[in-house]
Image: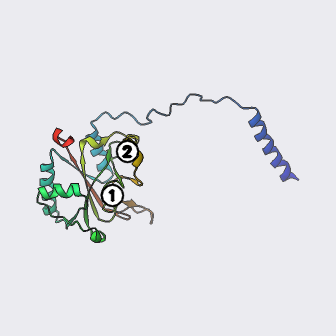
Amino acid sequence: MEESTSREKVLKKIRDALIEQTELPYPIIDMDSSVYPEIKDPLDVTFAEELVKISGKFVYCESVDEFLSVLQSFILEKDWPVLYCLDPTLQKILKQGGIPFEPDESKIIDALLGITRCEYLVARTGSVVLSSRLTPGRKISVYPETHLVFAYTSQLVPEIKDALHNLRKKYQSGYPSMISFITGPSRTADIEKTLVLGAHGPKEIYVFLIEESPLEQE
């Protein structure tokens, strides 16, 4: 009987609250303004700082030619293995620089070093935005131990919402089936709270940011 009485009391309070509605304490809520402080530094500087904070590597290049030169130096100095590239646009660029690569998709499971383009770079979080509309989808961003990202300065956006807005505008009715935000190397601390890099993807991520020339923008 006591349980029934307590239940009735609770239900009565709910009924009374529904009948006697109170005014909202905050009737006007701004849902559009950012909760973050304004980004005052240039977007490339902010992105680089945030990427480095999460153990990513940032490389600025003034041109595609400089990118090819730097990449060639990295391959020699770091003794990087064969570079996997399944993107026709990047394959053309790599051929211009005489950089060998593996284009066979069937061998991707053995890849240790892969390169992709991206959709956007989010300055606020240091994130790389990929989508299924980019060749080869998500494969090279997952299998290799080291992921290289090729991006132009025009792909920098301040916030995640800007990247999503631009994607909707860019693809319209053909919206990607997969959008991935990569924020630093893959990591987990599930086992004994010990941070492990490369648990579910690349151990390292390098973002090569190329200053875009007027000719490249066309």
The image shows residue 98 at horizontal and vertical percentages of 11, 60
Q: Is residue 53 left or right of residue 94?
A: right
The quarter of the displayed image where residue 205 is located = bottom left
Question: Who's the residue at 34% across and 35% down the image?
Answer: 39
Q: Which residue is mark 1?
A: 185
Question: Nearest the camera: 6 or 96?
Answer: 96
Question: Who's the residue at 19% across and 58% down the image?
Answer: 91
**Residue 211 in view, yes or no:** no
The image shows residue 65 at horizontal and vertical percentages of 12, 50
Circle 2: element type: helix
**Residue at the limit of the structure toward the front, as seen here:** 173
The reply to whether the C-beta atoms of the residues labelled 1 and 2 are less than 8 Å apart is: no
Distance between mark 1 and mark 2 Cα atoms: 23 Å
Give above or below for 199 relative to 15: below
The image shows residue 141 at horizontal and vertical percentages of 32, 60
Give above or below for 52 relative to 72: above
Question: Nearest the camera: 52 or 194?
Answer: 52
Question: Who's the residue at 33% across and 52% down the image?
Answer: 54
- Looking at the image, is mark 1 or mark 2 nearer the viewer? 2
Q: Which residue is mark 2?
A: 167
Tell how many labels: 2
The image shows residue 21 at horizontal and vertical percentages of 72, 32
Question: Nearest the camera: 199 or 162?
Answer: 162
